Image (spheres, rainbow, N blue to C red):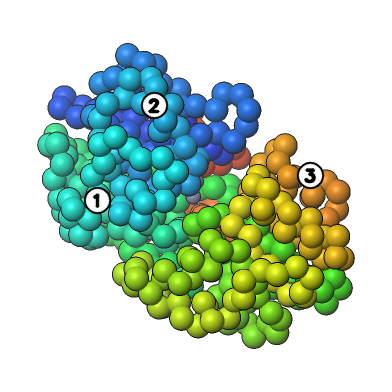
Amino acid sequence: MKLYIAGGCGEHGRNCFHVTGNNIDFLVDCGLMAAEQDRYPRLLSQKISRIQMVFLTHSHADHAGALPWLYENGFCGEVIASKHTLEQLPFKPKKAITLENICASGQEGVCHNLNIKWGKSGHCLGSVWYRFGTEGKTIFFSGDYMENSPVYRVDRIRGQQADLAVLDCTYGKSTTTYEKACEELLTTVERLLQKHGTVVLPVPKYGRGLDLLFSFLDSGLKTRYYGDAHFLAQLWNMQFSSSWYHMDGKTLFEAVHPYSKGRNGIVFVSDPQLRGTSAFKTAVETIKGGGVGIMTGTVEKGTSSATLIEMGKMFFCRYPVHLNYTQYENLSQENQFAITIPYHSAEVRCDKSIIEI
Ligand SMILES: [Zn+2]
Ligand SMILES: [Zn+2]
């Protein structure tokens, strides 16, 4: 079996891993780089037309955003992902297979000569890790992985065996623990709320927004909470996907009011880079009223979020939804992985682009 890294190692974005063997040819993720140039995975059309399957770890653009490009370049295979990931994609794959129809989490299933095992990765609704086996070899992908989420369930990666493992290492050399990062964020939010009255939090459509809300409520932070329609819908829908959450979401849903202009409190907008007009308008209204913003995840260059940070109207304070290098190493040691590859960080280099096992 051979792994070709088509993107995602030594860089942040366009995660794409090409696995080939005697009878198999598949991708794990097919993501976009946020930058303007060099956005797509390094894959040529001749190779793309032979790919049988694309397994998605989750729906974020750096993992699934290049799928339309893959189709344009001759892909005609199947897209396999959890039910929620498939539902969250902004486009409909031509041939899709729901992961839950192959096997339940933690069980072994088979698809096109490939033995598959998967588990929840704790990063967002529908996010998973994979272990694939074929021709007597095994390869493991953690996807974007987080064990500390108070909201999303995780099937902890422990005691897994693989000849090769590609593991989350997004935060690179940072040594900040989850607890420390949460503490810093809470202090920052409290301070900015006191000073400015309103804090706007741009969050991904699916991901850390729910974690943030839970953490604020859990800490006893006394303020009012507002959310856009998508944020409220996420909270309402928690009750229908109980196997993915630690809670039914009722308390969270009841704590949040629909956004209305001019009220003090915390405002969640489901658009991390403020690309859409509605989220941007909310942020501008908040700031004009004396409020500020806090970015809790990656700021993409050239976006409205980046501009507001440059203007000093928005601050950066990370909420962790990935691993750093120390946590990556710990994860390697808690499993039997013969070779491990760190991915998702520009700070951690990977010398090889092809690994044979
Ligand atoms: Zn992600
Ligand atoms: Zn990612």
Residue 119: x and y, percent?
Answer: 30, 58
Inspect this view and state whether residue 26 appears: yes
Q: Does 87 appear above or below 342?
A: below
Q: Which mark is residue 307?
A: 3
* Residue for point 45% across, 51% down: 144
Check disc 2: other Cα within 10 Å, few if <14, some if 14-19, many if 20+: many
* Quadrant for the N terminus in the image: top left
Q: In the drawing, does residue 303 fall left or right of residue 211?
A: right
Q: What is the spatial separation of the Cα atoms under label 1 and label 3, in whole angstroms? A: 39 Å
* Quadrant for the C terminus in the image: top left
* Residue for point 18% across, 53% down: 101
Q: Secondary structure at mark 3?
A: helix
In terms of depth relative to the viewer, which is nearer, 30 or 154? 30
The verdict on label 1 being within 8 Å of ligand 1 is: no
Q: Are marks 1 and 2 in contact (CB under 8 Å)?
A: no
Q: In the drawing, does residue 97 fall left or right of residue 287?
A: left
Disc 1 designates what residue?
A: 99
* Residue for point 55% across, 33% down: 33
Q: In the drawing, does residue 305 fall left or right of residue 148?
A: right
In terms of depth relative to the viewer, which is nearer, 224 or 46? 224
Q: Earlier in the sequence, mark 1 or mark 3?
A: 1
Q: Secondary structure at mark 1?
A: helix
Check disc 1: other Cα within 10 Å, few if <14, some if 14-19, many if 20+: many
Residue 41: x and y, percent?
Answer: 46, 27
